[in-house]
Image (tube, rainbow, N blue to C red):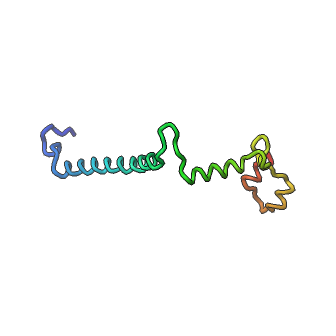
Amino acid sequence: MRIPRGSASTTPTRARKRARRTRQRLWLTGVLALSMPLGLTATAGGASADEPQLLQFEQEFLELYEKIKDPANGYFSDEGIPYHSVETLIVEAPDHGHETTSEAYSYL
């Protein structure tokens, strides 16, 4: 069924206008809410545009990651696989009928 133009069902009522305004306000509020954290973290460091500053937890994570992945540490092989042997798996992780990701990766 086609509704002719100008009929009562096609003209915007106060409720429709109010609903449209509400949707627009919610959309604008959402955009502002998403952009504020990005703007605050970008200006919080006070660094130049050429060199982005790392946050404290990012810096701590990278230090720990570098310590673990350091070749002098001896934990990873040249291929990046952690050193485990079947004997150490038996001592460190008894078989309970399943294998963890680390154990399964060691067998490769």
Choose between 66 and 48: the one closer to the eye: 48
| Residue 39 position within the rendered picture, expressed as x and y whole percent measured from the top left | 41, 46
| Number of marks drawn | 0
Image side of residue 47 versus residue 86, left or right:
left
| Residue 52 position within the rendered picture, expressed as x and y whole percent measured from the top left | 52, 42
Choose between 50 and 58: the one closer to the eye: 50
Residue depicted at x 59% and y 50%: 59
| Residue 23 position within the rendered picture, expressed as x and y whole percent measured from the top left | 28, 49
Image side of residue 35 versus residue 3, left or right:
right
Residue depicted at x 16% and y 48%: 13
Q: Is residue 46 shown above or below 89?
A: above
State the residue lying farthest toward the right: 87
Residue depicted at x 15% and y 43%: 11
Choose between 104 and 83: the one closer to the eye: 83
Q: Quadrant of residue 79?
A: top right
Question: Where does the C terminus fall, quadrant-wise?
Answer: top right
Question: Where does the N terminus fall, quadrant-wise?
Answer: top left
Image side of residue 100 versus residue 33, left or right:
right
Residue depicted at x 87% and y 56%: 87
Image side of residue 5 versus residue 25, left or right:
left
Q: Is residue 44 shown above or below 2?
A: below
